[in-house]
Image (spheres, helix red, strand yellow):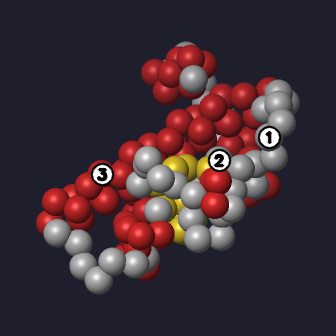
Amino acid sequence: MSNAQTGANDLTDSAQLPRVELTNDVTLPDKQKLTSENAVFEGRDWQIKIRNDLLTRASLSSREAEQFAETLFHEVRHSEQTDDMLRYKEPTGWRFPLSDFKDDVVKMARANPLDARTVDGMAAKGY
């Protein structure tokens, strides 16, 4: 998991995003465990939850390793989309209904507002 965390940190740092914490789904109630997807980004916790069986295998084939990297990139992209939405909305004082994002993530979004006239701003408006 530490190599995957390093990879996630590299992706978020290079995109100037808040770092996401990688964790597994072991602590989730059975009905919330991942079954059909390999991982999921949880915005409230700013975590990527990874299916535990992917992390406990003795080894991965080259294709499985490639798929894992693609999954990690895909979920980091979800964190980027969420960050864009926060950067677009939070500086205006608007709060996401029923959400409670981590304070450091919100502070980072407010400190770096997203201009609605930019491509990223227009995309965030449509999320």
Q: Residue 99: give its label.
A: 1
Separation of residues labelled 2 and 1 (CA atoms): 9 Å
Q: Residue at x 79, y 55 (%)?
A: 103
* Dots 2, 1 in contact, CB < 8 A: yes
Q: Is residue 105 left or right of residue 49?
A: right
> Which residue matches tag 2?
43
Separation of residues labelled 3 and 2 (CA atoms): 19 Å
Mark 3: few, some, or many residues within 10 Å (few <14, many ≥20)?
few
Q: Is residue 72 left or right of residue 32?
A: left
Residue 85 percent location from the top left of the image? 63, 32
- What residue type is disc 3 on? Glu
Mark 2: few, some, or many residues within 10 Å (few <14, many ≥20)?
some
**In what element is the residue under mark 2?**
loop
* 84 shown above or below 19: above
Quarter-wise, where is residue 96 in the image? top right
Mark 1: few, some, or many residues within 10 Å (few <14, many ≥20)?
few
> Which residue matches tag 3?
70
Residue 117 percent location from the top left of the image? 55, 16
Tally of marks: 3
Q: Residue at x 56, y 17 (%)?
A: 126
Q: Residue at x 14, y 66 (%)?
A: 62
* 37 shown above or below 2: above
